[in-house]
Image (cartoon, rainbow, N blue to C red):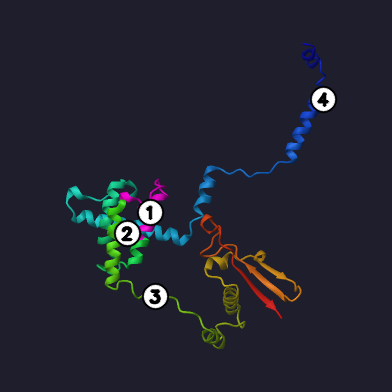
Amino acid sequence: MSSILATENLDFGNSESTSANTSHAESTNARNISLISDEELQKMKETRIPLNTKHNTAWAVRVWKEWADETNSKAPANEKVEPNICKVSDVELMHWLAKFVVEVRKKATKGECYPPNTLYQLCCALLRYLRNNGCPALSFFEDPNFKHFQDSIDAEMKRLTGQGVGANVKQAQAFSEADEDKLWTSKLLDDHTASVLLNTMVFLIGKNFALRSCREHRLLKFSQLTLEPACGTEPEKLVYVSFGEKNNLGGLKQSNMKRKRVEHSYK
């Protein structure tokens, strides 16, 4: 009992100053976090998708709708396809995807089949669209419930490959030293006018820093360049470090990839 009474008679006059000190310590240790709204977070999430990927996804959804509309114009009333792929159930999706990969044709050259890889990319884009619109767990390439579709696209891709469809793939030609010499001798690269000088700078920066896309050019910053002094046997260097490139934007899937680093030595 005496210990309890002693506690009750303690002087807590310094409690206010103690609280003030605690508040000061908390404010000193604050992280200065930056709050964002749900709308801002949604906009930030949308920036993770490259523009070309957005175009590819929109193209695939458009191909599906046009195929569905044409199918509906020819099929019986009891075999209609839902043009909005987001409204298709899993069972219907398995059925119609299997038909889609066999029936779909190019629009520009009517009746011509898509190459096997393009057909696969079409389905990948549709899957990406569905995952971003309410079906994040959908995986019709691995899900055993979609085996009918998997067997159908496998058979169609093998059929197209056997017919030589897509065998001649257009590839960008390597830019040789002779090609560059022609640009210099023809004065397309030079400094005689402001526009030609600008083109020359864009060319040289792209060449020397191994830039692969217009985006890398547009977002180039001085902070990506460092002049490292000579050290021991190492000469002075101009170092370029990528802040994100075409195949390595620094997201979850590229977390183990190293940033591109280009060095030019001064001797």
Question: Toward the viewer: 248 or 204?
Answer: 248
> Could you tell me which residue is drawn at 56 percent across and 43 percent down?
37
Residue tagged 4: 14
Q: Marks 2 and 1, how far apart in space?
A: 13 Å
Answer yes or no: is residue 52 visible. Answer: yes
**Residue 179 at x, y = what percent?**
51, 85
Residue tagged 3: 170
Which amino acid lies under the numbered mark 4 shown in the image of this protein?
A: Asn
Nearest to N terminus: mark 3 or mark 4: 4
Residue 229 image label? none
Q: How crowded is mark 3: few (under 14 residues within 10 Å), some or many (20 or more)?
A: few
**Residue 228 at x, y = what percent?**
72, 70
Which amino acid lies under the numbered mark 2 shown in the image of this protein?
A: Val
Which amino acid lies under the numbered mark 3 shown in the image of this protein?
A: Lys
Mark 2 or mark 1: which is in front?
1
Nearest to N terminus: mark 4 or mark 1: 4
> Could you tell me which residue is drawn at 53 percent across and 59 percent down?
254
